[in-house]
Amino acid sequence: MPLQTRWEKIVRQDMEELKKQPELISAAQLLRQGGLVAFPTETVYGLGANATDQAAVARIFTAKGRPSDNPLIIHIGNKEQLGEWVTEVPPLALRLLEYFSPGPLTLVLPHRGNLANNVTAGLPTVAVRIPDHPVALALLQLVNLPVAAPSANRSGRPSPTEAKHVWEDLAGKIEMVVDGGATGVGVESTVVDVTGEIPILLRPGGISLEQLRQVIGEVHVDPGLVHEHTAPRSPGMKYRHYAPRAEMWLVQGEGVQQYIQRRTQEAQAAGKRVGILTTREHQDRFHADVVLACGERSDPSSVARNLYHTLRQFDEAQVDLILSETFPESGLTYSVMDRLRKAADGRVVEV
Ligand code: TXA
Ligand code: MG
C-alpha cells in the first residue's frame, strides 16, 4: 500500500513505529547507497541525497538543473548530530534551535570539512536544519547521515508541496518519492547566518523576522533581499525562482481591482488567456479565464500553504498572463511576497 493512504494513521504513530515502515526503510537504504529520494518536510518536498557522498550530491544538481554554485541545506534527525558536521554553535544559534527546531529554520554555521564539497559549493559554511515532519525525521534517523535536500522541483519551477508536483518535475530522474500528503507551511525554511556577531536573515521563510527578533533581539536583513542591485549572500537568492510559465505582474495600491480588470480585458482582447491570483475574500471581485484564491487574507498561513500549488495551477490552466494581488510585508506574508516578487521577476505595478 502506498504511504499516502496510510498517512492519517501513520502521523499518529510514534517515531519508532514510523521507522518500521517498509517504505521508509527502503528510502533510507537507497539514500545510503547513493540514490536520490524525495521526501516531505513541513515546508516543501525535498530532494535528498547523502551529504557525505559527492557523486550522489552531484546527481541532485543534474536532476534539478541547478547551478552548482548554489549550495544545499543539510537535514539532520536530531540536535545531537550537529556537532559532527559544524565546528561551533554560538549561543544565539543555540537559542534559535531551542525555540524553533525542529522547524522551518535553517542555520548557516562553519563546517568541519567532512561533507561532500559540492554540498557547500566550496564555502567554509554549511546550511543545516532539522525538519518538523514525522516522516522526514523518521527517515533522517534511519539514514543516520546528513541528507542534502533542496526543494524537489526542476530549478526555476514553483517548489513542490505535494508528491505529484515532484513527479511532474522529476519523474525518471530520481529513485523514489516518499508520499506524505500535502506539506503544511508551504514556503521554504527561513535561512539565518549565525556565524557573525549579529545574525543575518538570508532568506525569509516559515519562521518570520518578527519571531526571530522576539527570541534573539537584533537581526540584520541581508542587503541583497532589500536592494535588487546588491549581490545576495545566500547564493540561491540571486536566481529567478518559483516561477510559473506565464508572465506575472504584482499589482498594489488603491486601484487594484480596476487596474486588474482593465488589464485583463486588454489582454483578452489581444487573444491572451489571463489568470488572477487573489484570496477567498476578494475572489468575487474579478473575472478572467482563471481566478484562483490563494488561501484567505485573514489567515496568512493559508496564503503561504497554498502559494506554490496555486502557481502550478496557473501552469495547468495554460494562461499567458497572471495578475496578482499583493500581501503585507510582515510576518509570514513577507516570505510570500519574496516568492511572488521572484515569480514575477520583479514586475510590480503601483496603481
Ligand atoms: O524548506 C527548505 O529549506 C527546503 C526543504 C526541502 O528543507 N529546502 C530548500 O533548500 O529550500 P534549497 O537548496 O532550495 O535552498 C537553500 C538555500 C539557498 O538559498 C542557498 O543559497 C542557501 O540556502 N544556502 C545554502 N548553503 C548556504 C551557505 N553556506 N551560505 C549561505 N546560504 C546558503
Ligand atoms: Mg528551491
Image (cartoon, rainbow, N blue to C red):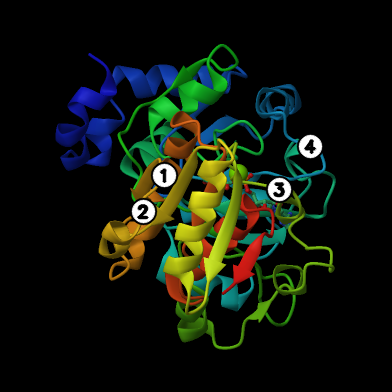
Compared across the picture, whether 119 is left or right of 4 comes to: right
The amino acid beneath tag 4 is Pro
Report the Cα–Cα distance between label 3 and label 1. Answer: 18 Å
The amino acid beneath tag 1 is Thr
Q: Quadrant of the C terminus?
A: bottom right
Q: Which mark is residue 294?
A: 2
The mark nearer the N terminus, 2 or 1, is 2
- Dot 1 corresponds to which residue? 310
Whole-percent x, y for residue 304 in the image: 41, 57
Where's ligand 2: which quadrant? top right
What kind of element bears circle 3? loop
Q: Residue at x 55, y 35 (%)?
A: 271
In the image, farthest residue toward the bottom: 217
Whole-percent x, y for residue 115 in the image: 72, 40
Relative to 351, does residue 20 appear above or below in the rendering? above
The mark nearer the N terminus, 3 or 4, is 4
The mark nearer the N terminus, 3 or 1, is 3
Of the pair 280 and 168, the residue shown nearer to us: 280
- Dot 3 corresponds to which residue? 240
Of the pair 266 and 348, the residue shown nearer to us: 266
Relative to 205, does residue 316 appear above or below in the rendering? above
- Dot 4 corresponds to which residue? 67
Report the Cα–Cα distance between label 3 and label 4. Answer: 12 Å
Mark 2 sits near ligand 1, with its Cβ under 8 Å away: no
What kind of element bears circle 2? loop
